[in-house]
Structures are given as C-alpha cells and as structure tokens.
Image: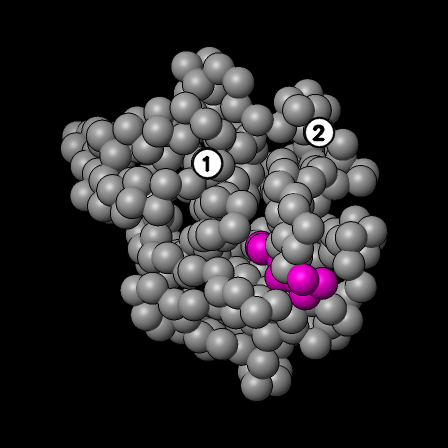
Amino acid sequence: MNMKSNYGQILYEDQDHKFIWLGADEKEDTGVIMTNQYLIIHKGRGILLDPGGLHLFSRVVSVASRFISLDNIDAIFFSHQDPDVSSGIALWLGVTKAKIYISELWVRFLPHFGLIDTNRIVPVNKPRMALPLGGMDLEILPAHFLHSVGCHCLMDPVSRILFTGDIGAADIRYTGDSLMVEDFESHLPAITGFHKRYMASRKATSRWASMVRRHDPVMLAPQHGRIFQDENVSRFLDWLGSLDCGVDLLDELYGDA
C-alpha cells in the first residue's frame, strides 16, 4: 500500500464508515518528522485524530475537506499534549464546531496554544470513556506514561483500527513507499531508540500491550511512521511488552554520574 501524500488514503471503508490516513508532508525533513493525521467518518459525521501543529494546518484542512465538510466534524481527539499533536487547536476550533477530547491533566495548558474559550473541551478523566460519533461509540483507552502522563489511544470498533498516538512511532522520513510495516525485524531500528527513551517503563508497556490484546485490533495506527497490521500487530505488542525502557534503564542513562 503506497503512500499518496497529497490526497490521503482510506484504510477501511464500508457503507457507513471510513478510517482515513490524511497523508504526510513531503517537506517534513527536520524536527519531528512524518507526523500522521487521521479522520474517522461514521454516517457522515467526522472526528480528527491528532490533527497536528500550526505548520500542518492548511494541508490537513485541504486533505480532510476531500472526504468531509468541516461543518460535519463533531470531535477532535488529542492523544496527548505535545505541540506536534495539538498546537493547532485554536485554528481547528475556529474552522469547526468540534468538541475537543484531551486528558484532563492537559486542559490547563491549552491556553498556551492560544485557546481562551474552554467550553468545547471534554476532559478525558476515566480509564475507559466513550466518544460518540454518528450514533456509535468509539472507545478512549488509557496509555498513561507512554510517553505522556496523560496519554490516551482511541479504538474504532467498526474498522478495528487502534489509533495509538506515539506508541509505535518510528523515526523515519516520508519517502512515498509503503504505509504499512512490511518487515517487522527491519523496522525495529526505526522504533527502538524512541521507545527505549520515551516510554516510561516495562511495567507501563506490558500493561498497555495486555489491554490492547483484549481489544484485538487488526491495525495499530501511530502518530509517526508506518502502520502495523495483521501479524505485525501481535509482533509489535510482544516486542513492546517485553522492552526495557525509561526508568528500567536509569543505570545506563546515568552512567558514573
């Protein structure tokens, strides 16, 4: 499945439902790279997932508008607070009527992204929380300390795609080749360094992996890099759940200091 950066790509589609990757920026060659944005549409109503920072706003608006009117976007989900995820929040509130779903831990930081009116903010404050869309419920699942203290992922029960935020993120640049992870072993160098440093501990990763297995997703769609599907879902969960990371590596990180 090749990446069509300017037009987006439908990952799942039936009569009532779509899960769409909204492309990659070919100019993203410095800083945080290959940031993925996603759009779910159910019966004509839409939700954006981690729509991105200020410099991505015009591109994401353009691609999303190919699939849905901005007036029909009912919600925007932020997996965590990083600027590459949420710094465009004030612009999105200006062009949509959407409610914003984000961890209650980060609501008080949103004014620093230019957001003054918080009436459309829905704080995520439960271990499992329903997010209604077009007559069905998506499920917000906890992903605490992976890597944010208030991180969440979003399960789409129709497509069975799990949006994972930064979990599964890869340090790769856009090349126009496959959107999917095709060879898990060869993909490991792109994900290992990030997960070892940014994920809090094996206790956190193994707890999350066990929870995800119970939901049995067919795809894991991260905010950076390629998507895991089919047997690579279980390969990634096995790898992540047994990874020494974060505080597990304190001796290595501190050295003789």
51 in relation to 98, above or below: above
Q: Amino acid at mark 1?
A: Val
22 in relation to 44, above or below: above
Residue sitting nearer the eye, 155 or 151: 155
In this orientation, does residue 193 appear?
no
- Residue 35: image quadrant is top right
- Find numbered disc 2 in the image and state the secondary structure of the residue it sits on: loop
Asked if residue 223 lies left or right of residue 14, the reply is: left
Contact (CB < 8 A) between labels 1 and 2?
Answer: no
In this orientation, does residue 242 appear?
yes
Mark pair 1, 2: CA separation: 19 Å
Q: Amino acid at mark 2?
A: Met
Residue sitting nearer the eye, 86 or 141: 141
Asked if residue 33 lies left or right of residue 58, the reply is: left
At x 34% / y 53%, what residue is drawn? 143
Q: Which residue is mark 2?
A: 3
Of mark 1 and mark 2, the one earlier in the sequence is 2
Q: Is residue 49 magenta?
A: yes
92 in relation to 166, above or below: below
Quadrant for the C terminus, please.
top left
At x 64% / y 53%, what residue is drawn? 17
Which numbered circle lies on residue 149? Answer: none
Q: Which residue is mark 1?
A: 218
At x 43% / y 68%, what residue is drawn? 130
Q: Is residue 100 magenta?
A: no
Q: Nearer the viewer, mark 1 or mark 2?
A: 1
Residue 137: image x %, image y %? 49, 64
Q: Which residues are magenta?
A: 43-52
Q: What is the count of numbered marks? A: 2
